[in-house]
């Protein structure tokens, strides 16, 4: 993410380019992001977003094929994990966004921002195969992809400007001037390398890559030639010549070669994904609605039939995890013998086995559970496609006293629930998203090689 200082060339503290108009669009985006963060994190004293909002609005690749979940592509752009996540994202948006808004105008700036955000989700989905099927099930949040689009546009429009960079060695600051093109090129390369070699890290690197590529690719469509011409002309004033020393060229040869190599590596990745050779298994996208102790809840989870128990145990919500755990223990989640069948149970009263991890040991505890009025329909694989019913069970807890532990059970919990699931073919969604990703990379290549001189407001020096 943009706030990870180890994965950047330092902290940019300012640039040498002037902007004269009020950056209303940039300020609106910052204000909306801050407002959403305040709403979604107040339960945690504004330190981090609550699981409820991540689950409700985070972008989950395995849900991209479900029409009712498409909104996640946009809602995820306004959710941030913690205070530092939004702090650095909004800092980068403010630093680079004002200049790009000045160059494009407000409406076109908004278009760039949101198109880059959509592209970020698309690239994230395309390259999720690198992390295995589990990567398609993890929510991604943050404005980083959309902001990366602004960085991509900045590289093409203002490669010859400079940034004042700050590094901090313990408590000692160090500052120096760095050419914008080199900083952004290095940043892009780091995102791409981390994306390829740490596919299951805590950061959606290919979302950053996708936003950056989109910012370059769509720039020729968005720019107003008259506006760009006036900005170029403005650089000819004596004052600007002293401080900015503008050039009429676009990217220099070294920058072009380096970014071309990076984009070609992306073309190779999107081509591989489009061939359907990633070998990803299918997952079940499950929507749960339940009432527990008078409170209505909705949750979305993805489950692999080859790893149901582990996927259920990794669900962050205690209430959802308990419900699915009991249904699975009762044999009502997945049973190949039930493939294509519909069943009805008036009442099921059993002691269900529940596994409890205590350090490296696993202990099985039997929990009194009663299921009433269960109705279920199973798909061709034997996974529950639809179900409804009422279940009364208990939560299991562990009390530790030094080297001694005690297992305790809660008071009875009663759920009234319905579940719906859909089979998601991961290879198919990878192929569908890889084609537009490929085309965006190709368009970005054309811009870098052929269009940079026409678009650059402040170009780089020609190399001897």
Image (spheres, rainbow, N blue to C red):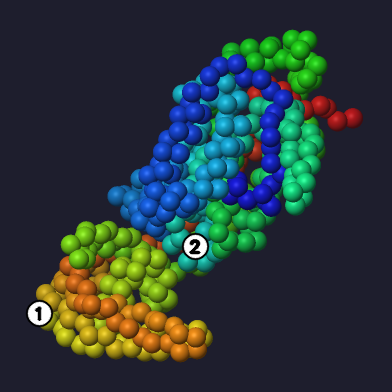
Mark 1 residue element: strand
- The furthest residue to the right: 464
Q: According to the image, label 1 marks what residue?
A: 346
Q: How many marks?
A: 2
Rounded to the nearest whole Å, what is the CA distance between mark 1 and mark 2? 38 Å
Residue 1, compared with residue 463, is above or below; it is: below
Q: Residue at the location (40% across, 62% down)?
A: 425
Q: Residue at the location (61% across, 56% down)?
A: 195
- In the picture, the disc for residue 157 is none
Residue 214 visible to the viewer: no
**Location of residue 292 by image quarter:** bottom left
Asked whether the residues under the numbered discs 1 and 2 touch, taking CB atoms below 8 Å apart as contact, a structural biologist would say no
**Location of residue 150 by image quarter:** top right
The image shows residue 340 at horizontal and vertical percentages of: 22, 74
The image shows residue 271 at horizontal and vertical percentages of: 58, 53
The image shows residue 274 at horizontal and vertical percentages of: 52, 55
Residue 67, compared with residue 216, is above or below; it is: below
Q: Residue at the location (90% across, 30% down)?
A: 464
Residue 297 visible to the viewer: yes
Q: Residue at the location (47% across, 66% down)?
A: 134
Residue 229, compared with residue 304, is above or below; it is: above
Q: Earlier in the sequence, mark 1 or mark 2?
A: 2
Q: Nearer the viewer, residue 104 or 147?
A: 147
Q: Could you tell whether 134 is left or right of 165 in the image? A: left
The image shows residue 220 at horizontal and vertical percentages of: 58, 27
Q: Nearer the viewer, residue 64 or 231?
A: 231
- The furthest residue to the left: 346
Count residues near mark 1 (Cα–Cα under 10 Å), then give few for <14, some for 14-19, many for 20+. few
Mark 2 residue element: helix
Q: According to the image, label 2 marks what residue?
A: 135
Count residues near mark 2 (Cα–Cα under 10 Å), then give few for <14, some for 14-19, many for 20+. many
Residue 248, compared with residue 121, is above or below; it is: above
């Amino acid at each position: 993410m943009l706030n990870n200082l180890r994965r950047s060339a330092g902290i940019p503290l300012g640039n040498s380019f002037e902007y004269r108009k009020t950056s209303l669009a940039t300020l609106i985006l910052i204000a909306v992001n801050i407002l959403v963060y305040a709403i979604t994190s107040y339960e945690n004293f504004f330190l981090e977003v609550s699981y409820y909002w991540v689950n409700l609005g985070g972008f989950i690749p395995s849900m991209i094929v479900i029409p009712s979940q498409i909104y996640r592509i946009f809602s995820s752009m306004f959710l941030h994990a913690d205070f530092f996540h939004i702090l650095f994202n909004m800092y980068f948006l403010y630093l680079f966004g004002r200049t790009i808004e000045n160059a494009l105008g407000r409406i076109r700036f908004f278009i760039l921002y949101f198109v880059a955000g959509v592209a970020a989700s698309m690239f994230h989905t395309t390259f999720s195969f690198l992390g295995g099927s589990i990567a398609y099930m993890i929510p991604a949040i943050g404005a980083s992809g959309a902001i990366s689009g602004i960085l991509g546009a900045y590289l093409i429009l203002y490669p010859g400007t400079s940034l004042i960079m700050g590094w901090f060695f313990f408590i000692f600051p160090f500052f120096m001037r760095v050419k914008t093109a080199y900083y952004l090129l290095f940043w892009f390369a780091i995102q791409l390398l981390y994306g390829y070699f740490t596919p299951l890290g805590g950061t959606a690197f290919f979302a950053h890559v996708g936003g950056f590529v989109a910012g370059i690719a769509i720039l020729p469509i968005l720019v107003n030639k008259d506006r760009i011409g006036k900005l170029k002309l403005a650089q000819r004033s004596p004052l600007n010549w002293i401080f900015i020393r503008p050039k009429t060229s676009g990217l220099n040869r070294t920058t072009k070669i380096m970014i071309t190599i990076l984009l070609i590596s992306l073309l190779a990745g999107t081509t591989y994904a489009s061939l359907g050779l990633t070998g990803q298994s299918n997952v079940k996208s499950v929507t749960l609605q339940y009432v527990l102790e008078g409170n209505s809840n909705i949750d979305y989870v993805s489950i692999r039939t080859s790893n149901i128990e582990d996927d259920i145990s990794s669900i962050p919500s205690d209430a959802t995890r308990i419900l699915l755990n009991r249904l699975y223990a009762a044999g009502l989640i997945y049973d190949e013998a039930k493939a294509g069948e519909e069943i009805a149970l008036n009442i099921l009263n059993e002691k269900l086995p529940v596994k409890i991890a205590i350090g490296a040991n696993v202990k099985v505890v039997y929990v009194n559970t009663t299921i009433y009025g269960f109705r279920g329909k199973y798909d061709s694989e034997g996974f529950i496609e639809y179900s409804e019913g009422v279940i009364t069970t208990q939560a299991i807890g562990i009390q530790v006293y030094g080297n001694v532990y005690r297992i305790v059970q809660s008071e009875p919990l009663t759920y009234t629930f319905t579940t719906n699931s859909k089979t998601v073919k991961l290879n198919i969604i990878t192929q569908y998203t890889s084609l537009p990703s490929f085309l965006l990379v190709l368009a970005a290549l054309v811009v870098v090689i052929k269009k940079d001189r026409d678009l650059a407001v402040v170009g780089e020096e020609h190399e001897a």
